[in-house]
Amino acid sequence: MRKFLLPLLFLALFIAESLFVQFMPEKVFGQSKILVPHFLYTGLLFFTIYIGKNKGILYSAIFGLLFDIVYVEVLGIYLFLFPFVAYIVTKVMHVLQSNIIVASIVSLGGIALLEIGVYEMNFLIHVTDLDFMSFINLRFYPTLILNAIFILLTGFLFKRCFEKYSEALKDD
Amino acid sequence: MPQFFLNKRLIILLVSIIILVALIGFSLRERSKLTWPEQFVKDTTGWVQSLVSKPANYVAGFFENLQDLQNTYKENKELKSRVEKIASLEAEIQALKKDNEDLRKINGEEKTLRDMEPSPATVIGRNPDRWHEMLIIDKGSLSGIKKNMAVVTADGLIGKVKSVNQFSSTVQLLSAMDPKNRISALIQSDTNIYGFVQGYDDKEKALLVKGIPSGAKVEKGQTVITSGLGGVFPQGLLIGKVVDVKPDQYGLNQTALVKPGADFYDIENVLVIKRLMTQPDTSDMSDGKEEDL
């Protein structure tokens, strides 16, 4: 039963991102910054941290491919970056102890890495011509703040959900 | 060397980078349509998205209605004054339309660049990463939608259809940076001035209309519409209003900054516009050596 719930949770986050952007007005608090929700990837990183490396990377690759096909139409960007950042996160978590605060901070770091990686790739294939400082001011800080708030709200829920899931796996 | 090959991680990284480059190269190529696995995945998720987005639209609409209620009194007053004018305007338009039709019949020119057939669609998704500005709408090739059709809201042009699946399609907004995105535009003044919509200024939030002859007098506040001469869009779709004019890099042309009439955010319903005038064949316009931009 729980095995079906997990993809459903990620699918819900996947669609929530699109809805969030669709209904967001141009200006937030009077400033026209670009806020990028990474709800799905926050979930995937918590999953990687609490369930394990192999499953985390597998799920990252599947949802990265889905993201590429549905939203981006350039295959490969997220298919590569999602598992790559997840792998780095597991390496970092080996060194640190896994409590919720460390997990949250590492996830936020992972999202920052993802955002920079996507910018560099898009710059390379001429999807954007934004220079790096404008990117930092216009997109990077606002995005990190938005996702920090999201992690603050849902990090605890993710942790409890995935810990229950891993217990259920052990029982099987 | 054997030790190098035993390093599994390095091999995996190299192989995945090769796959990455191959995939990006494959999808950046000029594609007339998506491959069938992509279409299948997009249609499936499109179905799920349309299930979710309809209730979401209701909820968002409810809050918008609440906001509207606040200024109802003021709006009502203003609208009443306009309604009186509309009745007389409508009568005038009817007469003019009939005149126009009759004259066209006499002339034997029954088709114009303005002829179009709109079909409504609902937005069911939007690209969350916001580099590639794209919308997903709930009508596809089964509803007669084809690649490169114009997409408008009530306030003006927002983009064109980028790719079509069976039950859903993707719309590329004008604010996306794509060198292939060129729209022939017409600035309405005493004489018609032509240019190309080409690119978007992220900081100014304005479209760039390039290639205007340096002698032409473009002023602030003039209206910009599609010219229909590009061969894809019909004539007369509103693009926006001129806010600034500046000479281009070498001083040969002018570039106009145009504030788009439509809001590129918070879009719920759109119209996909089919042009009824025949489209010229690309092979008629080029000698086959150039790639079409």
Image (tube, rainbow, N blue to C red):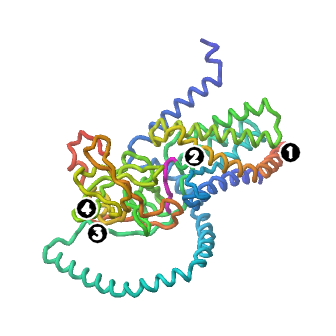
Q: Residue B235: where, in percent of width, then height?
A: 29, 64
Q: Secondary structure at mark 2?
A: helix
Per the model, the C-alpha gap separating discs 3 and 2 is: 41 Å
| Numbered disc in front, either 4 or 1 | 4
Task: Give the residues in magenta.
Answer: B131-137
Co-location on one chain, circles 2 and 1: yes
Q: How many residues crowd around disc 3 within 10 Å: few (fewer than 14), some, or many (20 or more)?
A: some
Amino acid marked by disc 4: Thr
Residue under label 1, please give it: A171
Is there a contact, CB below 8 Å, between mark 4 and mark 1? no
In the rendered structure, the residue with mark 3 lies on which chain?
B
Amino acid marked by disc 3: Asp
In the rendered structure, the residue with mark 2 lies on which chain?
A
Q: Secondary structure at mark 4?
A: loop
Co-location on one chain, circles 3 and 4: yes
Per the model, the C-alpha gap separating discs 1 and 3 is: 67 Å
Residue under label 2, please give it: A139
Q: Is residue B271 magenta?
A: no
Q: How many marks?
A: 4
Q: How many residues crowd around disc 1 within 10 Å: few (fewer than 14), some, or many (20 or more)?
A: few
* Along the line of sight, the residue nearer the viewer: B21 or B72: B72
